[in-house]
Amino acid sequence: MLTAPVFHGASRESREHIIERGIDLWRNRTAVFGRGFSLSSQPIERYGPGVVPAAVRLENPLVVPLDEFPDLVQNWGVVADDPDAILQEVLARGFDGIIVKGADFNRANQEADIIVFDVRTIRIIPD
């Protein structure tokens, strides 16, 4: 389980949408690690100025280093650019999300990228 707050970077418009209407997994345009809601251990500026702080409860996440993820998915026989197939395979293997270690997409010494598949396990932290 994660104990520190995590962050979702988005446009200001998307941030307001999330706060007002909740999380919609189908709005995610960059589903590299499977169809899910992406969060990070630090805000990622390139995703936009609309930072959404959150708390996440994952019981059994797949924890994988960034550089090992493509080979892992390929070994499972899943096409790497099919987010729905990745989601189904991860769930079929008993995982409830993914923690990608070393996913420093913002070059800010970020520890991990967190992919959550069940929005009921996310609590938005109000400002």
Image (cartoon, rainbow, N blue to C red):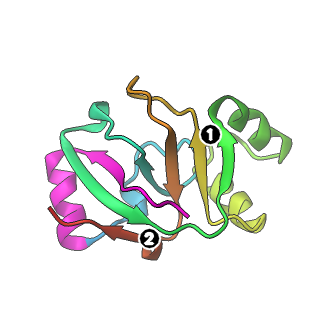
Amino acid at dot 1: Asp
Q: Is residue 10 magenta?
A: yes
Please give the name of the residue rendered at 56% of the width and 64% of the height, measured from the top-left corner.
Answer: 1
Q: Which mark is residue 104?
A: none
Residue that badge 1 annotates: 81
Please give the name of the residue rendered at 70% of the width and 59% of the height, measured from the top-left corner.
Answer: 90
Q: Position of residue 25 (x, y in %)?
A: 42, 62
Asked if residue 85 lies left or right of residue 75, the reply is left
Asked if residue 66 lies left or right of residue 115, the reply is right
Q: Position of residue 100 (x, y in %)?
A: 59, 42
| Nearer-N-terminus badge (1/2) | 1
Amino acid at dot 2: Val
Please give the name of the residue rendered at 38% of the width and 27% of the height, measured from the top-left corner.
Answer: 106
Q: CA distance from mark 1 to mark 2?
A: 22 Å
Q: Nearer the viewer, mark 1 or mark 2?
A: 2
Q: Which residues are magenta?
A: 1-21
Q: Is residue 51 magenta?
A: no
